[in-house]
Image (cartoon, rainbow, N blue to C red):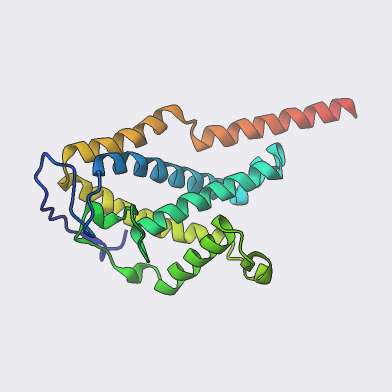
Amino acid sequence: MSATLQVTASLSAAPECPYVRCYSEQMDLEKAAHYLGFEVYHLRYYVGLYKQDKDFKAIGRFLGPAMQDSLSYSLLVHLRVLLTFFYPGQRKPGDCSVRHFIPQFRYARSTYKKQEIEKIRRHLSKRLVHFNSVRWTEADKHIGLSNYSHCADHIDELLTVFEAGLEELDPSIRKSYTARLQRFQRSEKSIEDVLALIKRAEECLKREDATKG
C-alpha cells in the first residue's frame, strides 16, 4: 500500500450515536456498514477469482459463456458501486460515500490517475448499467477486464485505509461491517476450492469422452 495513503478520523458525533452529519443529511452508518460489507466482500472475491482464472476462462469452459459473462458483470457491478463510494461525483439524495463515515478521509489521488477513474466511471455507467449507444458506437474502445482489475486494486488500497479508519468509529459500525464480511467468509467456498472442483469435473468429462470414443 502506498505510504502516501492516510486516514484521519475526527468525528463530531457522540460515541454512542452511529450517525455523522455530512452533506446536511443524516445517514444510519450501522446499516450502511452492513450493506457496504456485502459490496466489499464480493468485489474482493470476484477479483481474486479473476486473477487465478484469467477472464474466468476455466469456469466458462465448464459452465458455459453465460456463466463466464455473469462473473464479469458481477465484478464490474461491485466495482462501480465502490468506485462511486470513494469518488462520488455528482451526488444524489440518499447516496452514501466514504465521507459519511470519515469526513476527513484522505488519500493520494496520485496513486491512480484521475483521468483513468473518470474513463472507467464513464464506461461502467454507459456500458454496464445503462442501455446506451456507447455500446455500439464505441464498440472498439472497450477497456477490458484487465484494466478494470487494475482499478479494483486501487479501490482495494482505499478500502484498506478505510478499514483502518473504522477503528476510530463507534464499535457498532465496525461490528456491523466486519460481521457481514465474516458471514460470507464462513459460508463461501474458497477460490482455490472452486477452481479445483472445476478442474476435477473437467478431467471427469474428458475421461467420459475418451471412454465413449
**Residue 135 in which image quadrant:** bottom right
Nearer to us in this view, 211 or 179: 179
Residue 54 horizontal/vertical position (percent): 60, 51
The answer to whether residue 207 is above or below residue 129 is above
In this rendering, position of residue 128 left or right of residue 113: right
In this rendering, position of residue 196 left or right of residue 15: right
Residue 2 horizontal/vertical position (percent): 30, 63
Please identify the residue farthest to the right as the structure is shown: 213
At 46% from the left edge and 53% from the top edge, which residue is drawn? 79
The answer to whether residue 213 is above or below residue 66 is above
Quarter of the N terminus within the rendering: bottom left
At 35% from the left edge and 33% from the top edge, which residue is drawn? 182
**Number of numbered discs present?**
0
Nearer to us in this view, 22 or 5: 22
In this rendering, position of residue 8 left or right of residue 186: left
Residue 175 horizontal/vertical position (percent): 24, 35
Quarter of the C terminus within the rendering: top right
**Residue 88 in which image quadrant:** bottom left
At 40% from the left edge and 33% from the top edge, which residue is drawn? 185
At 23% from the left edge and 54% from the top edge, which residue is drawn? 25
Please identify the residue farthest to the bottom as the structure is shown: 115
**Residue 38 in which image quadrant:** top left
